[in-house]
Amino acid sequence: AQSVTQLGSHVSVSEGALVLLRCNYSSSVPPYLFWYVQYPNQGLQLLLKYTSAATLVKGINGFEAEFKKSETSFHLTKPSAHMSDAAEYFCAVSALEGGSEKLVFGKGTKLTVNP
Amino acid sequence: EPEVTQTPSHQVTQMGQEVILRCVPISNHLYFYWYRQILGQKVEFLVSFYNNEISEKSEIFDDQFSVERPDGSNFTLKIRSTKLEDSAMYFCASMAQGAGHEKLFFGSGTQLSVL
């Protein structure tokens, strides 16, 4: 079975500061890992994914995440926060790609960006 | 860009009433999903649907829930007799044949409030 834990339900940063959103996973098989973003009144949008290729994954809007097997982590970072990054971010894991395999989500981290 | 459309965006109902949440997946997609998010909790998998039948369902998806693809374009989630604890944001998602989860598209959700 798979699970993810997101540390910190709320993170607040200043505009221009580093964004670090933490995600740890548990999986009995090699995982596929995802970060989704949800802007207010919108659906879940894929930011980036890891599927056992490069451990450093680059996504949209300047975000990236690094898969660290030894730490069972997949933290999301962005060097310089922008006001438009304010949203809720979800880490998710699945065991298989494609087909009907479900995603297991974390509780989410709400990012606030202060001017 | 193609999108998954969900209606209504908000639904208020009385406990014990039946509700139908509607989704129009992307037209050439073959895999369909419902997820839900109770306020402050994780996004949870409910059910996946492929080839006109349920392919996987969670423990949450009990006999009160049903899904249907009535006309080849809509994908509906029915709750027969709503309970207070069914209050949540319900997300529909769809995916093309042979695609990975990076090709999973989510709708913007229906906020269900059971009074």
Image (cartoon, coloured by chain):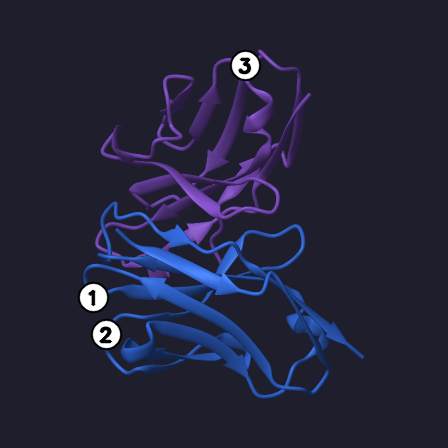
Chain colours: A blue, B purple
Q: Please state the horizontal and vertical placement of residue A4, each as a whole percent of the image.
A: 40, 59
Question: What numbered label is drawn on residue B18?
Answer: 3
The verdict on a common chain for dots 1 and 2 is: yes
The answer to whether residue B103 is visible is: no
Q: Nearer the viewer, residue B60 or B112?
A: B60
Question: What numbered label is drawn on residue A21?
Answer: none
For disc 3, the neighbor class at 10 Å (few under 14, some 14 to 19, many from 20) is some
Location of residue B104 by image quarter: bottom left
Q: In this view, does B112 lie above or below A62?
A: above
Element under label 1?
loop
Q: In this view, does A88 lie above or below B38?
A: below
Chain letter of disc 3 in the image: B
Location of residue B85 by image quarter: top right
Element under label 2?
loop
Reading the image, the residue beneath label 2 is A52
Reading the image, the residue beneath label 1 is A30
Element under label 3?
loop
- The answer to whether mark 1 and mark 2 are in CB contact below 8 A is yes
Chain letter of disc 2 in the image: A
Q: Earlier in the sequence, mark 1 or mark 2?
A: 1
Q: Please state the horizontal and vertical placement of residue A102, each as a whole percent of the image.
A: 31, 47
Residue at 66% in and 15% down: B14
Q: In which quarter of the image is the C terminus of chain B?
A: top right
Disc number lying in front (1 or 2)? 1
Q: Which of A9 and B100 is in front in this view?
A: A9
- Residue at mark 1 to residue at mark 3: CA–CA distance: 41 Å
The verdict on a common chain for dots 2 and 3 is: no
Q: What's under tag 2, amino acid-wise?
A: Ser
Q: Is residue B104 above or below residue A49?
A: above
The answer to whether residue B40 is visible is: yes
Q: What's under tag 3, amino acid-wise?
A: Glu
Numbered disc total: 3
